[in-house]
Image (cartoon, rainbow, N blue to C red):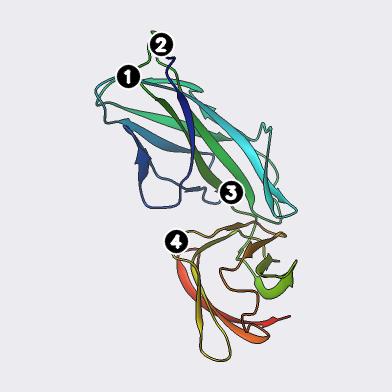
């Protein structure tokens, strides 16, 4: 008899409520308020069998345009191991360790991994999901993203680079470009990605190498759930 296949899935959640299979998670992004020491996230098992999982918190940074997760003692998830009965819910408590206020926002990722069934049985394809939930802790004082947009060529391809010199993350949603001739380029219809404070990220544009993107390019993007416009110069 063939052994059951194993499939691992990663869900980077970015909508009002999300889930796959039988596990639903809410909220899908957490932002602490100033002075708040604890928060929570609810996991709901909508299936007919128990769900087992592991919950871990990581510091989240970016380097060279890539996400980097590291060990942290600043944010603790409790309980770290969960068993959710059928049609039941479990609240995960997030405890923020006290510390001095920072000049920029702190970012974390909460990873929720589904574990194999306790009885060890499997049938068919064993799909285990990983949920990645962003968690943000505001800095002292007001903060906002400050974005600079640039279109450039790299290796013959057109690229979009977004640099964030502000003290708060930028969640980039639906994003379009318009060149001087009025041609519209859809970069993303949904979540494009996050740019953390002091970082920059680049994306390959879905255009031909001979696309006319020199000169001023108009940008429309949903940044932290708010529509914004900007101009950038292509090179």
Q: Which residue is mark 2?
A: 118
Mark 2 vs mark 4: which is more N-terminal?
2
| Badge 4 element | loop
**Relative vertical location of residue 197 with respect to residue 29 in this rendering, above or below:** below
Q: Which residue is mark 4?
A: 190
- Assign the N terminus to one quadrant of the image: top left
State yes or no: discs 2 and 1 in contact (Cβ < 8 Å).
yes
Mark 3 crowdedness (10 Å alpha carbons): few <14, some 14-19, many ≥20: many
Taking the image as drawn, is residue 101 in sight? no
| Badge 2 element | loop
Between marks 3 and 4 in the image, the one whose residue lies nearer the viewer: 4
Mark 1 vs mark 4: which is more N-terminal?
1
Total numbered labels placed on residues in the image: 4
- Where residue 208 sits, quadrant-wise, is bottom right
Mark 4 crowdedness (10 Å alpha carbons): few <14, some 14-19, many ≥20: few
Between marks 1 and 4 in the image, the one whose residue lies nearer the viewer: 4
Between marks 3 and 2 in the image, the one whose residue lies nearer the viewer: 2
């Amino acid at each position: 008899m063939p052994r059951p296949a194993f499939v691992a899935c990663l869900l980077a959640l970015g909508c009002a409520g999300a889930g796959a299979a039988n596990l639903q998670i809410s909220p899908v992004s957490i932002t602490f308020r100033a002075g708040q020491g604890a928060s929570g996230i609810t996991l709901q098992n909508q299936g007919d069998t128990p769900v087992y999982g592991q919950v871990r918190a990581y510091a989240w940074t970016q380097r060279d345009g890539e996400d980097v997760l590291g060990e942290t003692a600043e944010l603790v998830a409790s309980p770290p191991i969960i068993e959710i009965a059928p049609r039941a819910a479990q609240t995960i408590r997030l405890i923020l360790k006290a510390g001095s206020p920072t000049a920029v926002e702190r970012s974390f990722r909460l990873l929720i991994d589904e574990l194999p069934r306790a009885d060890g049985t499997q049938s068919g394809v064993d799909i285990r999901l990983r949920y990645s939930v962003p968690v943000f802790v505001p800095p002292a004082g007001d903060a906002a993203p400050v974005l600079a947009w640039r279109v450039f060529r790299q290796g013959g391809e057109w690229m979009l680079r977004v640099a964030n010199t502000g003290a708060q993350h930028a969640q980039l949603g639906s994003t379009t470009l318009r060149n001087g001739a009025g041609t519209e380029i859809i970069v993303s219809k949904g979540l494009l990605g996050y740019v953390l404070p002091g970082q920059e990220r680049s994306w390959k544009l879905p255009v031909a190498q001979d696309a006319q993107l020199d000169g001023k390019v108009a940008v429309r993007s949903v940044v932290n759930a708010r529509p914004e416009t900007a101009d950038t110069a292509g090179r």
